[in-house]
Amino acid sequence: MRYHKPLQGLYSGKDGIQRPKQSQRVIVSEFANLVAELEELLENIPGTQNLRLELGELRRLILEQRAPRFVLVGRRGSGKSSLVNAIFGQEVAEVGHTKSQTGRGRWWTYESELGNIEILDTRGLQEGSKPEGEDEESSPLESIVASIGERLPDAVLFLVKAKEVDAAIDADIDALLNIRRRLKEEHMPIVAVITHVDELEPKNVRLHEAEDEDPHDIEEKLKRVQEVQRHLDDKIREHAELKKDLVAVIGVSSYMSWKKDGTLRADERWRIEDLVFYLAKELPDEAQVTFARLSRMTRVQRTIAHRLTNVVSGLCGGIAATPLPVADIAPITSLQVSLVAGIAYVSGREMNVKTAAEFMAAMGLNVGIGYGLREVARALLKTLALGPGTAASAAIAAAATYGIGRAATAYFLDGKTIEEAKSEFEDAKEDGPKTT
Ligand SMILES: Nc1nc2c(ncn2[C@@H]2O[C@H](COP(=O)(O)OP(=O)(O)O)[C@@H](O)[C@H]2O)c(=O)[nH]1
Ligand SMILES: [Mg+2]
């Protein structure tokens, strides 16, 4: 039996050490064993290359999860801390203090109960400021480069204030170039974020509440946003080294404010969801689930849920068509229970067999009363009555799994009722998985 890296990002204490809850640990280790057993079984069966690839994908998405890692390039006051808060939808970073809040050149973990993000703050590259408690031994660039060598980031976020895009941003672009050059041949997506676009003219027109504003005012403001986006895009593309890695230039408002007691006072975020969506596409599989979960953004979470559903239904169909030499495990139903648990997890719930089993019972599937993955899977196996090794059972297994995934998405992500999820299950089962 192979052993695996412990699951990252599932649950962490204040000290940043990962401590999954007991029930979560159980399903994760059972799921890890299932994947390993299937990999071992399939290794000796010819023609199962695709199944093994799909298992690898699931392994990366669920078992090898880790926090996404971003480098932030932007001056003090450009809105780096605010952007981190805006992505979480929660106050995880201190905003707007005159003293530097973040030391330069080292990785910081921002934590929420839903997951963590690791940030390398490069401020200091384009200004002479010196954060508190900073040792003055190494230059800012050297310490940043050392941190990047230690842990490769997933993407670079280049932040510029909307009103400064026209002004002298050459120093900012130099900072970006400096980092880009040190990365040599590594691929490094760059997402340019124009912050404070709410402050563009006409000033008091609220983009985040556009439906209450005069459409002409909104149109005028959106035109300004597009202008600054185009301008920054042109500026970055002047440099061939940056051009090849630039994936998006996007204007946003990150403004949120909290009262002293922690309650939300204002949420004036605009296009942060689009930004999160672009960023998610650039992340490796290992960081996708954590990012979607902690963002609390349904659109991003739905994308992951669909992907999990497609992978798992493909796997279930393939497994049903493959006569496995060992009948001891109930891989198809175990995968189905894991799929539901995974979608519930992406939605922000704890990952456990109980939640998944309760949901499946509500769908009218007999899952018995056990709370172990295998117990539930065996009970479910009787209900679904899947005979192994035929094309017909393969189609049924894939369609049933697809229906389960769609129903779980409707219930956990779209806020549908159990009844609505149940009819989604019946409909999706009929239509079968999409062949995309
Ligand atoms: N109106 C508006 N204010 C913002 C936005 N982003 C940040 N701010 C404000 O700009 C100031 C500096 O932001 P901060 O996140 O601390 O910048 P940092 O120094 O780069 O970390 C704070 O007062 C924030 O509330 C934005 O998109 N719109
Ligand atoms: Mg800050």
Image (cartoon, grey):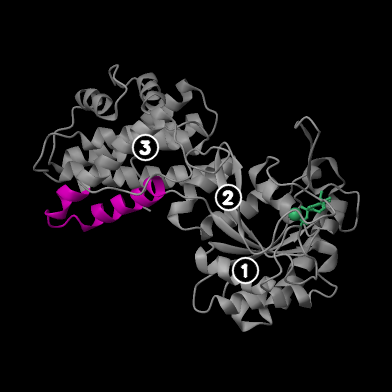
Q: Nearer the viewer, residue 117 or 233?
A: 117
Alpha carbon distance from label 2 to label 1: 17 Å
Is residue 406 magenta-colored?
Answer: no
Q: Which of the 4 image quadrants contains residue 29? A: top left
Question: Which region shows up in magenta?
Answer: 39-64
Q: Quadrant of residue 122?
A: bottom right
Which residue is pictured at 18% across the width and 37% down the height?
393
Q: Find numbered disc 1 in the image and state the secondary structure of the residue it sits on.
A: helix
Where disc 2 sits, the SS reads strand
- The answer to whether the beta carbon of the residue marked 2 is less than 8 Å from any atom of ligand 2 is no
Task: Look at label 2 and name its amino acid.
Answer: Ile
Q: Nearer the viewer, residue 349 or 323?
A: 349
Q: Badge 1 local density, few (<14 within 10 Å), some, or many (20+)?
A: many
Q: Is residue 40 magenta?
A: yes
Residue 27 visible in rendering: yes
* Vertical placement of residue 1 versus 130, above or below: above
Write down the residue under mark 1.
144
Reading the chain from its start, which is encountered first: label 3 or label 2? 2
Q: Residues within 10 Å of mark 2 (few under 14, many from 20)?
A: many
Disc nearest the viewer among 2 and 1? 1
**Residue under pointer 3:** 339
- 288 to the left or right of 135: left
Q: Is residue 349 above or below residue 309?
A: above
Label 3, label 2: how many angstroms apart (C-alpha)?
24 Å
